[in-house]
Amino acid sequence: MHEAMIAQNLFAAISDEAAKQDAKPTGAKISCGKLYAINDEALCFAFEAIAKGTTCEGMKLEIEHKPIQGQCRNCSQNFEVEFSHPRCPECDSEDFELLPDAPLVLEEIEFVNIQAE
Amino acid sequence: MQKVDVGKKILSANEQYALKNSRFLTEKKKLCLNMISSPGSGKTTILTRTISELRDKIKIGVIEGDIQTDIDAEKIRATEAPVVQINTEGTCHLSAAQVSAALEKLPVDALDLIFIENVGNLVCPSAFELGEAGKIVVLSVTEGDDKPAKYPAIFAKSKVLLINKIDLSGAGLHVDFNIKRVQIDARKLNKDIEIFPVSAKTGAGFVDWCKWLIKSVKSLRCD
């Protein structure tokens, strides 16, 4: 349910950009680390509710979930952590450090009718 | 149709407040721990018992997060520890801005340790940094021993795992709970996690948990 707050922040960022571009946004790409535990459906539902009656209404959101990164303490290898099988693929060690999750980023917005500058 | 690259961090407002809180607490050398669990795992009872046990050793303050009511803050207030209640009015987690405002209301200078009791929820709060030095995840035996496997993120991110209500499980008791399984699963996700099996009701396990708190407060003072 934290998706509601994220949707609100996302809506504010997209609205800002839409005002700057003086155009209607139709879609956006977002990326975030898996530890944000974002449920796509919940995020889209919340966004739709917030965007209703605004220039953002009807936007399509595309969410890319970036893998969790770990660093092996045995061989220093960086690798993608699978929580179902958390171990280094290189040396099979279970001793690893969880690296910071990829941030939540508004990557790209799609607009219609942008005015040429 | 035209695409515009934005590349803007979305939680950045929360991150800025988290950084502000973290700087404030580091400067003042106050230990701040963010307690996260499902509803009903016993966070508040753990806190009231911890406050009582450490009464003469360290000064504890509490920021209480709940969707509604100040029932938990009242329980903390009864221990005479300073407490600030935040009501999120429906939101499932605390934000760093709310914690920042609460810190202004606490007598921080007179404290050694500040607990943030997050809203009862094992998923959402783990995505919101509050500026704390570490997260404490509480799992009570009645919730089942499969939780680290099912909700890995919070166990991977936490400094400490408190396994609560251990007085309810064991041979011939009410709850089947394989404590070894939890320890193994949690350490698989997080080799460094400190695990303390406790009962906030009987006080079992509190000696080690309190020792860890005292050690952590002291090491912060000497840094």
Image (tube, rainbow, N blue to C red):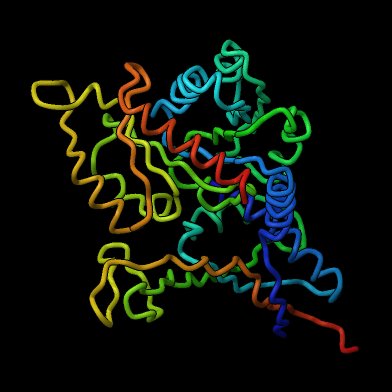
> Which image quadrant for residue B209?
top left
The structure residue drawn at horizontal position 24% and vertical position 22%, both measured from the top left corner, is B167
> Residue A5: in sight, yes or no?
yes
Instruction: Please name whichever residue, A105 or A56, is drawn nearer the observer in this view of the structure.
Output: A105
Q: In this picture, is B47 found above or below B147? A: above
Instruction: Please name whichever residue, B131 or B205, is drawn nearer the observer in this view of the structure.
Output: B205
Please, which residue is most extreme toward the front here?
A: B222
The structure residue drawn at horizontal position 36% and vertical position 70%, both measured from the top left corner, is A81
Q: Position of residue A116 (x, y in %)?
A: 87, 89
The structure residue drawn at horizontal position 25% and vertical position 46%, both measured from the top left corner, is B183
Please, which residue is most extreme toward the bottom here?
A: A116
Instruction: Please name whichever residue, B151 or B48, is drawn nearer the observer in this view of the structure.
Output: B48
Q: Position of residue A106 (x, y in %)?
A: 65, 70
Q: Is residue B9 left or right of residue A97?
A: right
Please, which residue is most extreme toward the right here?
A: A117
Q: Is residue B129 left or right of residue B139?
A: right
